[in-house]
Image: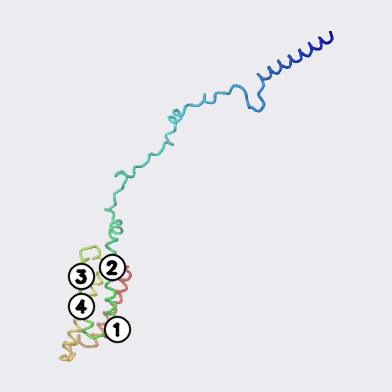
Amino acid sequence: MKKWVLVTLITGIVLFQCNLYAFGKSKLPVEGKGYVGTLPVLTRNYGSNEEATDKTPASVSPIPAKDFNSEREIKPAPIEDPSFVNIILKTEKSSKYVNDLNELIPILEEIYDMIDDNKNVQIFNAKVFYFNKSVDYFRDKYANKPEGQFISYKRLLELNTHSRSIALLRAEAEKYNPYLSYGSEGYIYNPTNIQQQLGFLKNEIRQTILLLRESN
């Protein structure tokens, strides 16, 4: 009798523990598996991507890309702007002009040295003649161009005239000196006057060379 009661008691305890385990499994979270239950609908307060795009403020709308191959996007050169014309378009012309100036500088330096060395009339006049022809070409090249208004251009033409007159004076003095008494009519051929005129020419050549160098 006692044995039967003990078996009944043990069976009841086992059944009670099984029911308790089954009840807890359905109600409690599983250890190590995180939350077990119903998740809220997180997207119920938000629209779709299309709705969000449609509601984007106009202030943050994307800037359309420019088509740089389009003729409308290429600005024409400001050819009517004086600064553009004088600085940009005339750069090449000015470079050629400066090159021509630089070719004249050595000729002037040689004439200057000839005056210092008191070279004879024939050598002096030959170099001046070459300078005159070079300036004549220079004058014809730039007379009707903007460079014709440059100070360096005008100074070269003035020096050309002056050097030609001195060369002519020296040639006449050498020709007529044996027949002149250096009176009132022959004073211009006086050696003192010729040396004075050469001094004036030398000073003018020096100033012109400085001007031409500053034009580079």
Structural distance between the alpha carbons of marks 3 and 1:
27 Å
Label 3 crowd bin: few (<14), some (14–19), many (20+), radius 10 Å: few
Pinpoint residue 87: horizontal percent, then vertical percent.
31, 59
Structural distance between the alpha carbons of marks 4 and 2:
21 Å
The answer to whether 11 is drawn above or below residue 66 in the figure is above
Residue closer to the observer: 81 or 39: 39
User: Seen in the image, is 12 located left or right of residue 79?
Assistant: right
Residue marked by disc 2: 99
Residue marked by disc 4: 129
Going from N to C along the chain, the mark reached first, 2 or 3, is 2
Q: Identity of the amino acid at label 1? A: Asp
Q: Identity of the amino acid at label 3? A: Tyr
Label 1 crowd bin: few (<14), some (14–19), many (20+), radius 10 Å: few
Going from N to C along the chain, the mark reached first, 2 or 1, is 2
Pinpoint residue 6: horizontal percent, then vertical percent.
81, 12
Going from N to C along the chain, the mark reached first, 3 or 1, is 1
- Residue 116 is labelled as 1
Q: Secondary structure at mark 2?
A: helix
Pinpoint residue 18: horizontal percent, then vertical percent.
71, 16
Residue that sits furthest to the right in the current view = 2
User: Seen in the image, is 174 located left or right of residue 103?
Assistant: left
Going from N to C along the chain, the mark reached first, 1 or 4, is 1
Q: Identity of the amino acid at label 4? A: Phe
Q: Residue at x 38, y 39 (%)?
A: 64
Structural distance between the alpha carbons of marks 1 and 4:
18 Å
Label 2 crowd bin: few (<14), some (14–19), many (20+), radius 10 Å: few
The answer to whether 216 is drawn above or below residue 198 in the figure is above
Quadrant (top left/top right/bottom left/bottom right) for the N terminus: top right
- Residue 137 is labelled as 3
